[in-house]
Image (spheres, rainbow, N blue to C red):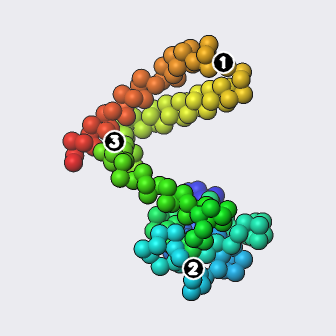
Amino acid sequence: MLTNKSSSEARVAAITMLDYIYTDEGQLNTWGGPEGIGWVKPGAGDVALDPSVTAMYKPKPLAEVPKNNQWGSLAQYNNTLAFRNAQAVPQDIYDETGLERRLFQATKLYEPKADKSKVYPDAQIWGDPSVATELATLKTNLDSYVNQGELAFITGSKNIDTDWDTWVSGLDGVGMKRYLELSQQAYDRYKAAK
């Protein structure tokens, strides 16, 4: 863990490692493991998930990949759509190994129907720094309340028919109105700056 007490060498090493992870080679080796173990270079007949791009890598079937040979989701710092779409995937969408292509094709069917104007651009909206701590605390409390409620309804300790309204009204008790107010202010600033 890097802190203000870590050495400058440790800080440089961490930044160097992150720089490496942001490269295609770094993504492949951290996300998929070493070449030949977690992934291989695509062959002549291999087609990328997105057929309009050149295949860059071919993940090996999970049953063939030894455990603990890669970082997996811990290395998803630069996992772009372009990188994902450059994986070679079998073309038979009805075979288990072609599931990724089947999902890709199904998603493409829905893209024209998506109303992009209704997508909340949360990566571009920042709350006022003077309320950042309050906003973070509210989000933590709301996330916890929702997760606990979800679990309670799934496991049956809460009944969706009889406990739902009480659970929804409980959102106000953990700060939902204030969270929405602060989020709306940030969104309004974002829209005004455009």
Q: Secondary structure at mark 2?
A: loop
Mark number for residue 46? 2
Separation of residues labelled 2 and 3 (CA atoms)? 37 Å
For marks 1 and 2, the one nearer the N-term is 2
Whether 133 is drawn above or below 168: the answer is below
- Choose between 136 and 34: the one closer to the eye: 34
Residue identified by numbered label 3: 118
Residue identified by numbered label 1: 159
Kindly identify the amino acid type of the residue bearing the numbered disc 2. Asp
**Residue 82, position as x, y percentages in the image:** 45, 68
For marks 2 and 3, the one nearer the N-term is 2
Separation of residues labelled 1 and 2 (CA atoms)? 50 Å
Q: Nearer the viewer, mark 1 or mark 2?
A: 2
Kindly identify the amino acid type of the residue bearing the numbered disc 3. Lys
Determine which quarter of the picture holds residue 33: bottom right
**Residue 65, position as x, y percentages in the image:** 75, 70
**Residue 121, position as x, y percentages in the image:** 36, 46
Residue 126 appearing in the image: no
**Which quarter shows the N terminus?**
bottom right
